[in-house]
Image (tube, rainbow, N blue to C red):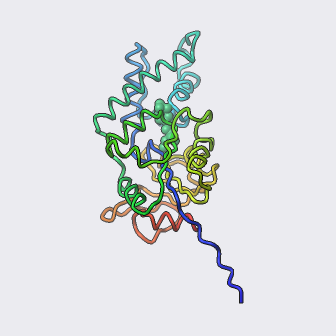
Amino acid sequence: MVINKMAEKELKALIFDVDGTIADTERDGHRVAFNLAFDELGLDWSWSVELYGKLLSVTGGKERIRYYLECFNQEFKKPDDLDGFIAKLHQLKTQHYTDLMSKGDIPLRPGVERLLNEAREQGIRLAIATTTTPKNVEVLLTQLLGAESLTWFDVIAAGDIVSSKKPASAIYDYAIKELGLDASECLALEDSHNGILSSMAADLKTIVTINEYTKDHDFTGASLVLNHLGEPKEANTVISGYQCTSNYVDINCCREIVNK
Ligand code: XBP
Ligand code: MG
């Protein structure tokens, strides 16, 4: 008798989003940095917590500023060199953001450090696929996990390294290609609708950990949606999707998801 057993897929890499997934950086990090940059250039713009939630529908800081001008501040008299103006504003914002992050006031989300360590112990490779500026990732990882943590990631795919930001698949496609793996051997960790559109378009199974800004997003197609990754002593809450054996996300859970 021939037993037709499906071949096990081997989990070889975890690909992490950064903003909202590794740390809750949007409201008290990026938003505040944008406002400081506006002040510095003498602009009377102010992005409230609520408005910023709407602006988050567009990923990328420069793209977000442009979206704000198009949809929320049409009265603003645009300079002739709008691209240059936005680039300068965004450079200032990045400086403020990295200064803020250097203070270390925004912590890692539950379970992130543990899962990174477990992956490294078990020979699972690590990568990052994010829309944010590379310098922001460098400062965040250095501040929260130590400078050495930058070497834990075989690929840090960030910002303008690809021409189309999330929800396009480009940043995940790039990370997978640089890892030299097949999408079926990788698992993505995300926090937002645009994030899963991007990861799923790259054929990645995806775990979502929601946050205040993303809790009402549409996560159709995600393998698992949770409040956070959880810890052995801080169980997570499953919102939808696959129920792992453990009540926190560990490497076994990641393996189960890649194989389901
Ligand atoms: C993150 C972003 C980024 C940050 C700002 O999205 O959209 O634009 O908000 O970073 P994701 P920059 O988590 O889906 O990658 O200002 O450096 O672009
Ligand atoms: Mg995100």
Q: Can residue 107 be spotted in the picture?
A: no
Q: Residue at x 28, y 34 (%)?
A: 103
Q: Residue at x 41, y 57 (%)?
A: 120
Q: Locate residue 110, reporting x and y percent.
A: 35, 54
Q: Residue at x 51, y 61 (%)?
A: 240
- In terms of image quadrants, where is residue 46? top left
In the image, residue 185 above or below residue 146: below
Q: Is residue 204 left or right of residue 142?
A: right
Q: Which is nearer the eye, 136 or 229?
A: 136
Q: Is residue 154 left or right of residue 139?
A: right
In the image, residue 219 above or below residue 50: below
Q: Can residue 219 be spotted in the picture?
A: yes
Q: Quadrant of the C terminus?
A: bottom right
Q: Which is nearer the eye, 110 or 215?
A: 110
In the image, residue 256 above or below residue 151: below
The extreme bottom residue here reads 1
Q: Locate residue 144, reporting x and y percent.
A: 32, 44
Q: Which is nearer the eye, 2 or 96?
A: 2
The extreme top residue here reads 80
The extreme right residue here reads 1
How many labels, in total? 0
Q: Quadrant of the N terminus?
A: bottom right
Q: Locate residue 40, reporting x and y percent.
A: 38, 16
In the image, residue 124 above or below residue 259: above
Q: Locate residue 74, reporting x and y percent.
A: 57, 18
